[in-house]
Image (cartoon, rainbow, N blue to C red):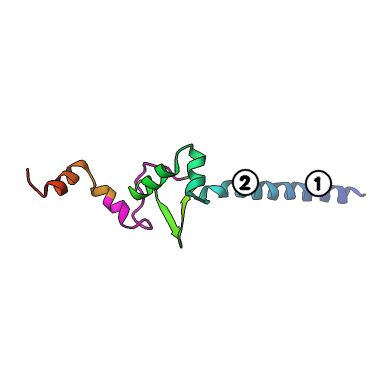
Amino acid sequence: MSTVEKALEVVIESVVRRVVREELAAVRAAPADEMVTIETFARMRAISKSTVRAAIRGGRLQATRIGRAVRVRSDAQIGEPAAAAGSGAPAAAAVSDTPAARAMRILGGRS
């Protein structure tokens, strides 16, 4: 091998290493957007499935319905207000469902 071939091989090797590192970094970062089942989400956080379902119903956790299946972002946090877009009425209902609002509904506006 000549010196030019060796130099070319070193350059190609460094470029390939850089590209592979960038691709691996992109793949490692991708699972943050991953959608998982309620069961998987609950298992990842060591909580019950009913807790996850209650958070979805209460608007504290955004979920996506695909047919009959329900999926949650793997990096979602329970307790953060769910965005109104995509979650529908539960998020809006959760915002107005304060103890005072519930009391007014139960009492029918009476004091």
Label 2, label 1: how far apart the Cα atoms are = 23 Å
Quadrant of the image containing the C terminus:
top left
Check disc 2 and report its element: helix, strand or loop.
helix
Q: Residue at x 49, y 45 (%)?
A: 41
Amino acid at circle 1: Val
How many marks are shown on the rendered structure? 2
Residue 15 lies left or right of residue 98; in this view the side is: right
Residue 79, image x and y in percent?
36, 41
Amino acid at circle 2: Ala
Residue 75, image x and y in percent?
48, 45
Q: Nearer the viewer, mark 2 or mark 1?
A: 2
Q: Residue at x 89, y 47 (%)?
A: 3
Question: 10 Å neighbourhood of mark 1: few (<14), some, or many (≥20)?
Answer: few
Q: What residue range appears in magenta?
A: 76-93
Residue 97 lies left or right of residue 104; in this view the side is: right
Residue 2 lies left or right of residue 94; in this view the side is: right
Identify the residue position indicated by label 1 in the image: 10
**Magenta stretch encompasses residue 29:** no
Q: Are marks 2 and 1 in contact (CB under 8 Å)?
A: no
Residue 6, image x and y in percent?
86, 47
Q: Which mark is residue 25?
A: 2
**Magenta stretch encompasses residue 82:** yes
Q: Residue at x 49, y 46 (%)?
A: 39
Q: Earlier in the sequence, mark 2 or mark 1?
A: 1
Main SS of the magenta part reads: loop
Residue 88, image x and y in percent?
33, 58
Where is 89 relative to 104, above or below? below
Which of the two residues, 24 or 22, is positioned nearer the viewer here? Answer: 24
Which of the two residues, 28 or 92, is positioned nearer the viewer here? Answer: 92
Question: 10 Å neighbourhood of mark 2: few (<14), some, or many (≥20)?
Answer: few
